[in-house]
């Protein structure tokens, strides 16, 4: 079997790369720090390309594609530190709602939500089932919140319009992630699914979120290594570029090796989830662990090579450092996923 992206997938990735290079330079990311917005003109451009609705079924105006199609695009979003919530809305919320619709969930709100997601008219935020009381990334500014509560028969997934929830903004290392603490009261009217069915949907959602976040970390790592290599070629010490020093070469090469090992693992996890592999959950954990470690190492090396200037406002690197440090912990850290994988292996699952 030939494991590779199709020509169509690669062409779509390249088209998104070109658009993001034009629409989302580092000046745009800096501007988003000052005035973060869930939906910007860039989001409308992505919606016109079909990216925003990529995971929405065709019956609701989307493209009906899977994680394998989405992962390269999210990687490109990470490469530019895209401020808009592509990963959360398209990679997590849309597939979850699509799954609920396909499973016959009798909630009249799901169809209109999917229609709006496909058109880029709705931005969604999803709570981490492992930390339902924690601040939710993207909640401040989202239109739809998918939140988790404990019910009498197990977990409950609730869907709430933002008008029905009081969201308190929470300070974040990366302001563009727009953390928010929802204040809400669970109601039978807002339940989408409960009990064992909810637990199954939430488990799949957590795996998808881990893989999508891992893909964004790949793009961030690639961008940091690239900009640091450029800096090392230009920065001179002792009369020569610091990139000519063996120690600097080794630092960057080591970070690149970790990235190259992580990338196929993330792609493989996306394929496992799309095909319903029995090892898909383990693959998701491996992907998030590898990507988190690769990106944090790229961040460490990049900051070391740049020196203290790398964390100043004037240097672009800090935009990528902050996103990396935030996402490395989101949806489970490397340590969390290694522990989860060990538990699964010991249990024989």
Image (cartoon, rainbow, N blue to C red):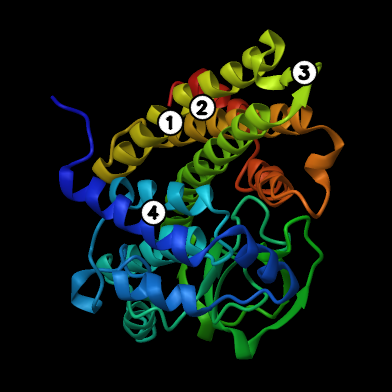
Q: Which mark is residue 259?
A: 2
- Return the residue found at the far bottom: 163
Q: Which residue is mark 1?
A: 263
Q: Badge 4, how many Cα within 10 Å: few under 14, some, many 20+? A: some
Q: Quadrant of residue 284?
A: top left
Name the element at disc 3. Answer: loop
| Upstream in sequence: badge 2 or badge 4 | 4
| Upstream in sequence: badge 3 or badge 1 | 3
Could you tell me if residue 3 is visible in this image? yes
87 to 225, vertically: above or below = below
Q: Nearer the viewer, mark 1 or mark 4?
A: 4
Split into 4 quadrants, where in the image is the N terminus?
A: top left
Q: Which mark is residue 239?
A: 3
Name the element at disc 4. Answer: helix
Disc 3 from disc 4: Cα separation: 37 Å
Q: Tell whether label 2 touches label 1 (CB within 8 Å).
A: yes
Q: Nearer the viewer, mark 3 or mark 4?
A: 3
Disc 1 from disc 4: Cα separation: 17 Å
Residue 60, image x, y percentages:
24, 78
């Amino acid at each position: 079997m030939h494991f590779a992206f199709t020509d169509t997938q690669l062409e779509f990735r390249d088209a998104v790369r070109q658009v993001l290079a034009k629409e989302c330079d580092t000046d745009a990311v800096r501007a988003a720090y000052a005035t973060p917005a869930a939906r910007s003109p860039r989001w409308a451009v992505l919606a016109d390309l079909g990216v925003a609705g990529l995971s929405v079924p065709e019956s609701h105006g989307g493209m009906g594609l899977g994680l394998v199609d989405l992962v390269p695009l999210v990687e490109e979003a990470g490469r530019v530190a895209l401020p808009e919530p592509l990963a959360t809305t398209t990679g997590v919320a849309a597939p979850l709602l699509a799954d609920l619709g396909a499973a016959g969930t009798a909630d009249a709100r799901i169809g209109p939500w999917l229609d709006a997601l496909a058109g880029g008219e709705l931005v969604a935020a999803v709570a981490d089932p492992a930390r339902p009381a924690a601040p939710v990334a993207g909640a401040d500014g989202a239109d739809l919140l998918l939140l988790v509560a404990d019910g009498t028969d197990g977990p409950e997934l609730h869907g709430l319009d933002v008008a029905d929830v009081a969201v308190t903004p929470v300070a974040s290392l990366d302001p563009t992630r727009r953390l928010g603490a929802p204040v809400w009261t669970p109601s039978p009217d807002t339940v989408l699914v409960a009990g064992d069915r909810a637990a199954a949907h939430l488990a799949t959602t957590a795996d998808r979120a881990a893989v999508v976040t891992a893909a964004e970390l790949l793009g961030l790592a690639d961008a940091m290594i690239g900009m640091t290599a450029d800096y090392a070629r230009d920065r001179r010490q002792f009369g020569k570029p610091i990139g000519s020093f063996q120690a600097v070469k080794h630092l960057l090469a080591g970070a690149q090796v970790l990235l190259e090992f992580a990338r196929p693992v993330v792609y493989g996890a996306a394929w496992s989830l799309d095909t319903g592999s029995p090892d898909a959950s383990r693959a998701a954990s491996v992907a998030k662990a590898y990507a988190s470690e690769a990106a944090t190492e790229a961040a460490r090396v990049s900051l070391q090579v740049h020196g203290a200037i790398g964390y100043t406002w004037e240097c672009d690197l800090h935009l990528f450092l902050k996103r990396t440090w935030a996402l490395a912990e989101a949806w489970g850290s490397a340590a969390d996923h290694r522990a989860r994988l060990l538990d699964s292996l010991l249990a024989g699952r």
